[in-house]
Image (cartoon, rainbow, N blue to C red):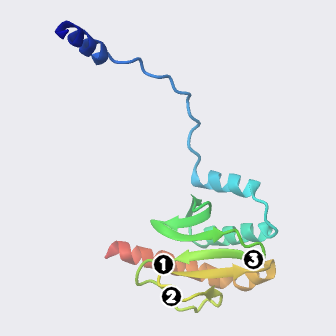
Amino acid sequence: MAARKTQAKKASAKKAPAKKTKASAPKKSGPEEVAEYLKQLEHPLKAEIEAVRELILGANRKIAERVKWNAPSFYYQQDLAAFHLRPRDCVHVVFVFPQGTMPADRFGFLEGDYKDRRMARFRSMAEIQEHKAGLVKLVNHWVRAIDQLSAA
């Protein structure tokens, strides 16, 4: 009986052959993920979504993008904003602010009184153009706030 247990232990101690796995495709970069996401997106305000995306990315070279929370989002060291694409009547963007960096709405388009975020809703290309300068200022305010937090 003891001999059988010893043989069983020896047999189980042998390593099983490694399973072969298929080579996985290289992970896409954030901009590649977003481009693919937007290519497949069906939304009545798709052109407006892409215009807001270009404004945010163009506002400051430090801003990067990726797909997070099942939507295109923007970040620089921390999350900045994400599209909320369920509404079909507007381009809804959620801006997230680190503690103590919430700006007063001197930009003219932020909504809500949440502790750590504000919303923006753009219903047309004309509305996006109307708030273009404010959106660029907001993004740069956010980047400066992050830089100040990092330096502290």
Give the position of the N terminus as an image quadrant: top left
Left or right relative to 58: residue 43: right
Give the position of the C terminus as an image quadrant: bottom left
Q: Give me the C-alpha separation between circle 3 and circle 2.
A: 23 Å
- Mark 3, secondary structure of its residue: loop
Left or right relative to 45: residue 119: left
- Mark 2, secondary structure of its residue: loop
Residue found 74% across the figure and 86% down from its top: 130
Indicate which disc, 3 or 2, sits on the residue closer to the N terminus. Answer: 3
Indicate which disc, 2 or 1, sits on the residue closer to the N terminus. Answer: 1
Q: Is residue 117 above or below residue 24?
A: below
Quickly name the residue at label 2: 103
Identify which amino acid the numbered label 1 is placed on: Phe
CB atoms of marks 2 and 1 within 8 Å: yes
Residue found 54% across the figure and 89% down from its top: 113
- Mark 3 or mark 2, which is nearer to you? 3
Quickly name the residue at label 1: 97
Rendered image quadrant of residue 25? top right
Identify which amino acid the numbered label 3 is placed on: Cys
- Mark 2 is surrounded, within 10 Å at the Cα level, by few (under 14), some (14 to 19) or many (20 or more) other residues, namely some
Q: Is residue 84 above or below residue 127?
A: above
Give coordinates of residue 56: x percent, y percent: 63, 71
- Mark 1 is surrounded, within 10 Å at the Cα level, by few (under 14), some (14 to 19) or many (20 or more) other residues, namely many
Q: Is residue 116 visible?
A: yes
Quickly name the residue at label 3: 90
Q: Give me the C-alpha separation between circle 2 and circle 1.
A: 9 Å
Q: Check the image and name the residue furthest to the front.
A: 1
